[in-house]
Image (spheres, helix red, strand yellow):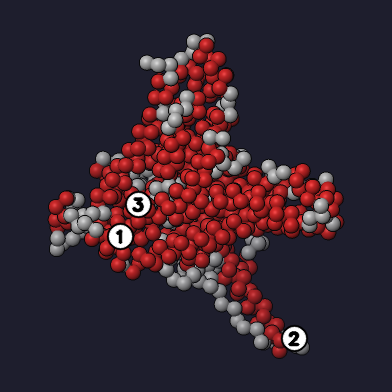
Amino acid sequence: MSKRTLPRLLQTPAVLLLLVWMLVPLGMTLYFSFIRYVLNSLRRPEWTSPSLSNWRGFGNYEFVLKSKDFLLSIQNSLVIVCSILFLTVILGVLIAVLINRAFPGRGIVRVLLISPFFVMPAVNAVLWINMILDPVLGLQGITVGSINDMVEGLRNAPLVGWFFSLWPELTPISFRATQTSALAVIIMVTWQWTPFAVLIFMTSLQSEDQQQKEAAVLDGAGPWSQFRFLTLPHLGRPIAIVVMIQAIFHLSLYAEIEIVSRGNGNKNLPYLIGEFANNNIGAASATGIFAVILANIVAIFLLRMIGKTLME
Amino acid sequence: MAIVAQSSKLSNVLWPVLAWIVGLLFFFPIFWMVLTSFKTDADAVKSEYLLWFTPTLENYLNMTENYDYWRFARNSVITSVFATIFTLVVSIPAAYAMAFNPTKRTKDVLMWMLSTKMLPAAAVLYPMTFLTKSLGLFDTHFMIILVLSLINLPIVIWMLFTYFKEIPKDIIEAGKMDGVDTLGEIKEILIPLAWGGIASTALLCFIFCWNEAYWTVRLTTTDAATLSKLIEGNRAPEGLFFGRLSAVSTAAVGPIVVLGWFCQKQLVQGLTFGAVK
């Protein structure tokens, strides 16, 4: 045995574990996606156990592609992920620049800012949808209610009453409804992940070339052109990384969607799989394969990007 | 510095004020949850008790009665602690091998490990349920520990790898000269040297385990159910239990948020795989 064989063998347990973890369930999903397989069927009891004799070819894929929820859930997945990415990157850059300067209490502000990231997703969803966004009992409802009361009181006031009588009565938004539930998910996930973007951008800003900046100031560059031509290009790479990592996490959002509306109006791909898996395992598996393909498209970009810096 | 000298007095005041407002805004929902946890369920939904109310510990004292909190908390602690230990035991030797004895394929292996992390969990939902049930592992601590370890293994190996790479090879080689074997090298040289990095990696792994909400919800019913399961099962849509729901939520996330404050820096390294420094 050569001197280096044992040290190299030390990675085998990790590799084997991950290999089994990846191949076995994924292989089963692939297999199930090509057969007829349901959990309950009185009419066709032979379909309730997985068997090659129930071969269906691409039938499950066709079924999924034709179901009206499929396109809707892909669209929802993309709308939710893209909105969150857009908001977290913009907010993240602005806040990172804001707290990159030294000011009194900067350490405390950092701690306050990062906290949402460590809140467990289930608590995040429960907290926002009930205590903050609820149209009657939450802060939203209470705020809208008290504004209405105030305006109502002012309507009867002398002199200014006519002005306030022109004001409309505000109606609170119900975030559990079909049209708005995706919005609630976007708000709560943005709250949770903006701190992550801030943290990464801030780390990156600290390595910004200060001499270059000072030279730019001497050349008469204002704060805006400093930001536009020095800071923003410097943040290019961290922004790309934040986008990719978040895309991977948010494509598999589940707890938030389940808690906000049980998928009403904002089903995404993982949620659709969960629904199919209540009975139609074949369709759930085919949808799963679609989800893997979608995630892979994102992953290939990420791996390329990280791979470049890995061995530096 | 020139930049500071250039900025006006007004912005010197406005800047910190704005930063504080943003910080407080982001923290507000957590503050609100903690505040509500000290209100009775009845007071929690009344606008006249929004900020001024008689604080009560009732919700915390009744947590065991209302939610059986400690059973779920115990499961969260057990699964997260053992999953973290198991992950470290597997990944320290692996990261050691990759950092100090790399082959041509090491880079590919690391990339492949990362790619397993990108597999959407939902895609293998049914096979996993099927396997755990047929192996009799459904709703057991063992299964949850195993799954949590496997989920976090790639990130933990990556983090350790980036730490180990910073250690000069000569120090490890010196141990070889003294006739220390490989395991001794890891135990007596590597672990003491990289202790800081290993500790913060463990902390981050623990936080991820604690917050995991897909498999812990779907592969358990009661015996191994963690706090994620408890909260998801008690979403209280009617708003009747805001007080007690806040208390149990605060108890579920409080320790983790505090732990998180201590490993902000490692979070950046860990989640960007060392690509942002």
In the drawing, what numbered circle is on residue A160?
2
B138 vs B179, nearest the viewer: B179
Tell which tag, 3 or 1, sits nearer the viewer. Answer: 3
Disc 3 versus disc 1: distance between alpha carbons? 11 Å
Disc 1 versus disc 2: distance between alpha carbons? 59 Å
Q: In percent of the image, x 58 and y 68: which residue is there?
A: A140
List the residue tagged with mark 1. A276
Tell which tag, 3 or 2, sits nearer the viewer. Answer: 3
Disc 3 versus disc 2: distance between alpha carbons? 61 Å
Quarter of the picture containing the C terminus of chain B is: top right
For residue A106, side relative to residue A169 (left or right)? right
> Who comes first in sequence, dot 1 or dot 2?
2
x then y, percent, for residue B84: 46, 35
Label 1 environment density (alpha carbons within 10 Å; few <14, some 14–19, many ≥20): some
Q: Are marks 1 and 2 on the same chain?
A: yes
Q: In percent of the image, x 30 and y 56: which residue is there?
A: A286
Disc 2 residue type?
Val
In the drawing, what numbered circle is on residue B123?
3
Q: Helix, strand or loop at disc 3?
A: helix
x then y, percent, for residue B16: 76, 54
